[in-house]
Image (cartoon, rainbow, N blue to C red):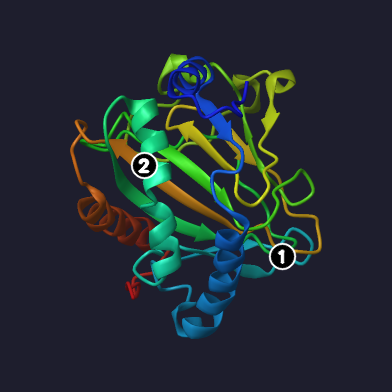
Amino acid sequence: MSATATRPAALRADYARDGFVVVRGLFEAHEMCAARAEADRLLVDFARLKDTRNMRCRWQNNVFTGECTFETFDPVIDLSPVCERLARAPRLLELLAGLYGEPAQLFKDKLIYKPPGVKGYGLHQDWIAWDGFPRSFLTVLIPFDAADRDNGCTVVYPGYHHHGPLTPQDGKYHELPADTVDEARAVYLCLEPGDVAVFGGFAPHRSDPNVSTGPRRQLYLSYNADSDGGDRRAKHYREFHDWLKVKYAEYGKTDTYFE
């Protein structure tokens, strides 16, 4: 259910069957060392950005203390040349072109730190029924730290992507009921730095809390097929920020901004 070979035909077949693939060792150790140093640098050089009103930042509660904790820069490549190089690395784009059968376009980019104690995400699909949202949407995980069950690695469920959207197509984010999937089919994406995992927008997935003593830093990169709208990244973030403003206002937060 995961692929370790880099033969395009084999990877494409596995991706079509399961909705995800894993490729081991796509990036080299020195690249991942630089990525970890970059993740540390961003926290220092851009500390001013960590504000709950800033739409670039995501926050999660600590499952032990209840504290609202900074977790994510979204987007990140405009802050980080290292993250942009990874997102546009020719070997990664070649891998995605093999899965799509055509070039891939970067759609979204975020760096999730997932510090100790931070909760995970409930079962969901990434595809949302927004007008024009690409059905070819997929996500690439690039771990800066080893991802395992203790630190809340991503969990995917092979084959369910064949059913398409599993929630109402009303433009809202929905979590899936637990009984949507057979937990016996769960695949924990345990990854080492240098590995990558790719899963489609219709692949149900979730993650558990980080109960380890260290962070689980991963670069989450999303793409669409070139024929499915071309370069849509700037348009996506304009629409995403408009959506966030509306959602935050529903909870009384009307002073949001993006920096």
Quarter in which the C terminus is drawn: bottom left
- Residue type marked 1: Gly
Identify the residue shown where x is 75% and y is 61%.
Answer: 117
Q: Which residue is mark 1?
A: 66
Judging depth in this view, the residue of 151 and 9 nearest the camera is 9
Q: Position of residue 157 (x, y in %)?
A: 61, 24
Res. 74 in view: no
Q: Which residue is mark 2?
A: 93
Judging depth in this view, the residue of 111 and 240 nearest the camera is 111
Q: Position of residue 54 (x, y in %)?
A: 40, 73
Q: Secondary structure at mark 1?
A: loop
- Residue type marked 2: Leu
Res 258 label? none
Q: Circle 1: is it few (<14), some (14-19), or many (20+) Cα within 10 Å? A: few
Q: Viewed as shown, does residue 132 lie left or right of 192?
A: left
Q: Viewed as shown, does residue 137 lie left or right of 12?
A: left
Judging depth in this view, the residue of 101 and 110 nearest the camera is 101
Quadrant of residue 110 in the image?
bottom left
